[in-house]
Image: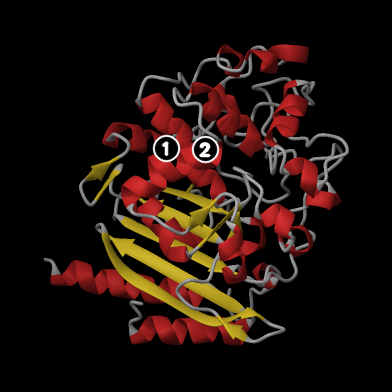
Amino acid sequence: MIADPRIRNALERAVELGETGISVAAYHRGELIVDAVAGVADAESGTPVDDRTLFPVFSVTKGVTATAVHLQAERGLVDLRAPIARYWPEFAADGKDTVTIEQALSHRAGIPQMPEGVTPELMADWEWMTERIAEFTPLYEPGTASAYHILVWGWIVGEVVRRTDPAQRSFDAFVREEICEPLGVTDFHLGVPDADLPRVAKLSGGNEFSMVDEHNISPPAVFPGSTAHNLRTVQQAVDPGAGAIATAGSVARIFAMLAEGGELDGVRLLSRDRVATFTRPREGAHDPDKVLTIPVWFGANGFWLGGEPDASDPLVGDHREIVYSPGAGGSIAWADLRDRIAVAICHNNMDTPAIVSPERTFEPVVRAIREIVAERTEDER
């Protein structure tokens, strides 16, 4: 663990403010500078969080899944502006023949709904999910409306990766072998192995949030909250949009690769030019989102973007060269491409985003990280 006293104090403050268990990791200029934990992984048993505790991170997962499809584009296997149906012919049914990969990445595919009758067990069945999605009729004309695809996004993008993989691997195997293993990441799971289930933190709260759901977008049976995500079936499902379970250190290391322009510790996964495109806003960037009730500033390539007043999360920074992935219940990871900072914060009390006074629970942690980064930057001058 790497825990400057300021980080330890900040984590203790986060617990005082309402966190149950919390883990944070940060990189600066490719070096791990923070890796620390506080609180308990299970409020009932009192089991403390440690450096091996795994946290469900919900839509933080989307940043890693977006990275996977960009790997395929980097290799010339995918054209992001091509129709999804070029790679997944069955997807063309019922008016989806023109939906592009970029439209899916940017939540403008027009199909934010989940399949009718979905259950945790069916959500864990990849073939059932993708077959149902291929049959969808768009709710909105593709490319015309911004509508956050809360859950279904993962299978749309994940199936493109699977279909274009010459080795025809499952999506979780692709991420493990093409992203995690090259970077030395060992604790990012899309489906937690049996032996590691005891390491998963027990979630609380988060079973509702403000959104417009008239179309089965986030049905109760699989809602991204503690009720569903404490289930073993969900913890072991391959859910590329909201299902990763990981340590903060593992998530931060993947985002550090992005913050370093696609290369970390001599391992290059993406070109610097491609990573730079991640900050491009999506089409209709200022359009109100039809699902989320908060302001949304989203990119064309699968990430939320920093630097937009009253829309971007101020925790991640205040300029335009920031990409981030926030998750239901508050978990978050970001890559600051300008200042070469990557941060991941995971926790298990999904109700703490409602805490804003006297400050948000993550604010002391981020403040401490920025103090450490400022000192390092000054020392290097």
* Image point (27%, 37%), residue name: 272
Q: Pointer 1: residues within 10 angstroms few (<14), some, or many (20+)?
A: many
- The answer to the question of whether label 1 and label 2 lie on touching residues, with beta carbons closer than 8 A, is yes
Name the N-terminal-most of marks 1 and 2.
1
Q: Name the residue under label 2.
A: 302
Q: Which amino acid does label 2 sit on?
A: Gly
Which of the 4 image quadrants contains residue 139? Answer: top right
The residues bearing labels 1 and 2 have C-alpha atoms spaced at a distance of 8 Å
| Residue 354: image location, x then y, percent | 69, 70
Q: Which amino acid does label 1 sit on?
A: Phe
Q: Pointer 2: residues within 10 angstroms few (<14), some, or many (20+)?
A: many
Q: In this view, does 326 lie to the left or right of 319?
A: right
Which of the 4 image quadrants contains residue 348? Answer: bottom right
User: Coloured how?
Assistant: secondary structure
Position of 46 relative to 340 (above/below): below
Q: Is mark 1 on a helix, strand or loop?
A: helix
Quadrant where the C terminus is found in the figure? bottom left
* Image point (57%, 51%), residue name: 311
Query: Looking at the image, how many numbered discs can be counted on the residues?
Result: 2
Which of the 4 image quadrants contains residue 241? Answer: top right
**Which residue reaches farthest front?**
195
* Image point (45%, 74%), residue name: 51
Residue nearest the observer in this picture, 356 or 253: 253
Q: Is residue 310 left or right of residue 233?
A: left
| Residue 326: image location, x then y, percent | 57, 54
| Residue 163: image location, x then y, percent | 54, 23
Residue 224 visible: yes
Position of 52 relative to 89 (above/below): below
Residue nearest the observer in this picture, 276 or 30: 30
Residue 151 marker: none
Q: Is mark 2 on a helix, strand or loop?
A: loop
Q: Name the residue under label 1.
A: 278
